[in-house]
Every structure is written in C-alpha cells, then in structure tokens.
Image (cartoon, rainbow, N blue to C red):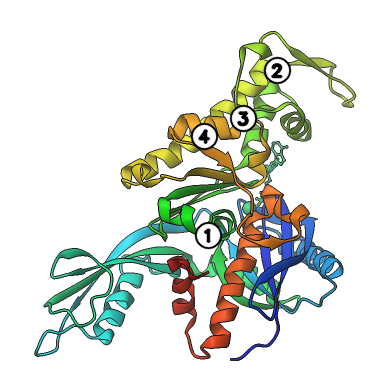
Amino acid sequence: MFDSDPIIVGLEIGTSKVCAMVGEVGSNGALNIIGVGQARSRGVRKGEIADAAKAVEDVRNAIVDAEQQADVEVRSVYLGVTGGHVRGFTNRGMHPVASADREIAAEDVADAIKNAKVINLPAENTPLHAIRQHFLVDGQPGVIDPVGMLAARLEVDMHVVHGNAHRFQNPIRLIKGLPLDVEDIAFNGLGSALALLSHDQKQMGALVIDIGGGTTEYVVYSGGIIRHTGVLAVGGDHVSNDLAYGLKVPLRRAEDLKIQHGSALTSDADKGQTLPLTGEPGLHTKTINLEHLRRIMALRLEELFEIIAAELSQAGLLNYLCAGVFICGGGARIPGIDQLATRIFDMPATLGRASSVSGLKSALDQPEFATAAGLVKYGASQHRKRDGDGFVNAIRKRVQIFFGRA
Ligand SMILES: Nc1ncnc2c1ncn2[C@@H]1O[C@H](COP(=O)(O)OP(=O)(O)O)[C@@H](O)[C@H]1O
Ligand SMILES: [Mg+2]
C-alpha cells in the first residue's frame, strides 16, 4: 500500500536500554536522523522479553522521548529482534527444471528460492531473512542470473536467518499493545551492520560485532552480500557478573568498576595497582587489584571473540574479511576492545560508527545506537521500495537490502 508518511522509526528493545530512533525521508529520498529516545531496559533478559509489564513501560518511555526530540508522532516502528534462538545458516534449495526444453524460467528460480528458505528449519522456527548467495546450474557454481540457461537441475544457496516464531511474536505483541504498528522485524545484527558498513566495506568483506548487555550479534558481509550471522547469549553483563564473582563485590559495584577501570587488555603497568573500594554499607572496606580486574575482563572477552573466530574459520570466511572487524554496542566502550579483536582475529579491528546514516551526529556517534540507526536505514529502504512498487511482498523486500540497494 502506498504510504506517504516519511517518518521511519527503528526500535531496539535491548537488554540494557531501549532505543527508538526517528528518521525522516526527505523529498529527494535521502534519510536524515532527527531524533532519538532511550530508556533503561528492565524487562529484557538476553535480548528477549522477560517482564512484559516493565518492558512495555520502558518502550513507551523511549518512544515518548524520541517523539519529543524529533517533534513527531510515532505510529509505527521497524523492530529489531535477537536472542539465543536466532540462527543463521546457509541452505541449498533444489528445483528440477520441468519444462520440455529445459530452459530455466523465472518460476523455476522462484521455486528454488522458496525451497531453500524453509529446508532444514525446525518446525517451530520461521525465516526472518533469506539472502540469496548464488545459483548452481547443473552443478555449475557461482551463477548470478540463471534465467534462460539450460539445465535439468537448478540449485540456490540462501543464507537464512531464522528463529522461534513464538519468541519473535513476543516483542511484536508488546508493541502492538501500545498501540503501535510493527512495519517489519529485522535481526539486530543486520541493523548494526547496515549502520556501520559502507558499500565498499560490504564488498571487500567485513565482520560487525555488536556487544550488548545480554547478547552479542555478529554479521559477515562479503561481495556485498551477507554471508554469515549469529548471536551469542553473552554480553557486557556477563563481564560484570564475572567481576562480581571474581572480585567478590556486589553486581552493581562490579558494573561501576568495569565502566570506570575496565579494559580488555592487561598490561605490566597494572601490576601491583590497587583500587580502594569504600562506602558500601555492610561491605568491608577492601581493595581491588587492578590487574586482576582487567584479567577477568580480558578472559571473558577473549573467549567471546574466540568463539566467533572459530565459527567463521569453520565457515571458511576469515580470509574474506579484507575490510576487517568493526565493533559496536555498549561493549565497544571497553578500552582496548579493538586491540583485543585485532589480536584474536589477526586483522585490523576498529570501533564502528553509524557513519552510513546521516543526521544527529550526537546520537549516531554512540556505539549503543548503531542497531536502531540501522533499523531506520532498513525501514527507509523498504519504504522507498514500497513507494515504487506497491505489491512487493515482505520477504522480497527483505532480500533487496542485502544486494547493496539499501
Ligand atoms: N564505558 C563502558 N565500559 C564497559 N562497558 C560498558 C561501558 N558502557 C556500556 N557498557 C556495557 O555495554 C552494555 C550495554 O550495551 P548496549 O549496546 O546498550 O546493550 P543492549 O543493546 O543489549 O541494550 C552493558 O553491559 C554495559 O555495561
Ligand atoms: Mg543491542
């Protein structure tokens, strides 16, 4: 349906914060961020709703905050989703070419794609994104457009991001209860990658890692297409937990220590340094060993990166990341996190900025807001598509963005 509303809102209901970002699509089609709202998130665990009453309040607060800053009324959102149930894998769909002359028609392509989207998905799961990689025509790999070629067998590799259908519904129902419309849902990692990566970086190959409170999302682009996606139900909050156990301090203290004195690296300069810990009722005055604190952090973060590196190595993707690693999410604020990633992935790693989106610089510079900024970009691309083509179905719209037409 034609929609003349040029306001696009990206919403991330994160484990640590809720972020609503408002973008405006100008008459020339350019997207500009005009406002951002945020609220502390109290109803989310590991990226998923755990206390709907609190979450709905937090989302409302973030939306109101965004409305005030952007001076618009928010009616609908592009909602980011994540969680340990979200998986990405590459599926091969097969379709026998049935026509007498064995010439591949557009319908054969559509059937092969349809098969690849659903094959091997657990019954309770639904595809969230389906990204076409390339076709195989009678086993010949790397075919970009097979229509008109002759073959008995057409195959297609699709990267499918999928997850539990009910668990995707929980945040959608929450938003609808506000009441707000959900235009579409998208994987949070995709949002972050869209915000951070330029067209060239997507072509050259890049890994985006978004370290949030309770989850870490990662996405690999190469040749302009998404090649790999994943989520680990581990984030900055686990670092704080490790500190609480390891240093024997309350969690709130551990969080403060992480933010004030944390680092992803240990150095000789930390040796023998202590931090006095005072003022906690019921807690003996004690000192914290700075080297110990940073070693605990480094171990957890190293493990996080190593899990991702092992997965990408197994998928044969590490050699395709010519643009390097880009880190965002609140975890990007940890001093030395880029150096640690450089060491573990053995390639240049930098802190990512939502530089592919324009507008409010103060918001776009915050690593926590990358997902929401990318969701606005995702929404804007769909909006443009809808304006130009009234009957494009939701899945096809999703596919477009992965081919660099965002
Ligand atoms: N200066 C900092 N140093 C270390 N960790 C930080 C810092 N600022 C934020 N964080 C951590 O970032 C995480 C929140 O990141 P965010 O991207 O907002 O999460 P989410 O998207 O899950 O809501 C928390 O674990 C928080 O402790
Ligand atoms: Mg996040």
User: The residue under label 1 is which amino acid type?
Assistant: Leu
User: Residue 241 location in percent, x, y?
Assistant: 66, 34
User: Residue 352 location in percent, x, y?
Assistant: 60, 46
**Marks 1 and 3, the one that precedes in the sequence:** 1
| Residue where numbered disc 1 is placed | 190
**Marks 2 and 3, the one that precedes in the sequence:** 2
Rounded to the nearest whole Å, what is the CA distance between mark 4 and mark 3?
9 Å
- At mark 1, the secondary structure is helix
Rounded to the nearest whole Å, what is the CA distance between mark 1 and mark 4?
20 Å
User: The residue under label 4 is which amino acid type?
Assistant: Ala
The answer to whether mark 1 and mark 3 are in CB contact below 8 A is no
User: Residue 248 location in percent, x, y?
Assistant: 71, 23
Rounded to the nearest whole Å, what is the CA distance between mark 1 and mark 3?
25 Å
- At mark 4, the secondary structure is helix
User: The residue under label 3 is which amino acid type?
Assistant: Gly
- Residue 281's image quarter? top right
Figure label count: 4
- Compared across the picture, whether 196 is left or right of 274 comes to left
- At mark 2, the secondary structure is helix
> Which of the labelled discs sits on residue 290, or is there none?
2
- Residue 224's image quarter? bottom left
> Which of the labelled discs sits on residue 341, or is there none?
4
Q: Is residue 199 above or below residue 212?
A: below
| Residue where numbered disc 3 is placed | 336
Which residue is found at the position 68% from the left and 65% from the top? 11
> Which of the labelled discs sits on residue 281, or is there none?
none
Which residue is more in the foreground, 238 or 351?
351
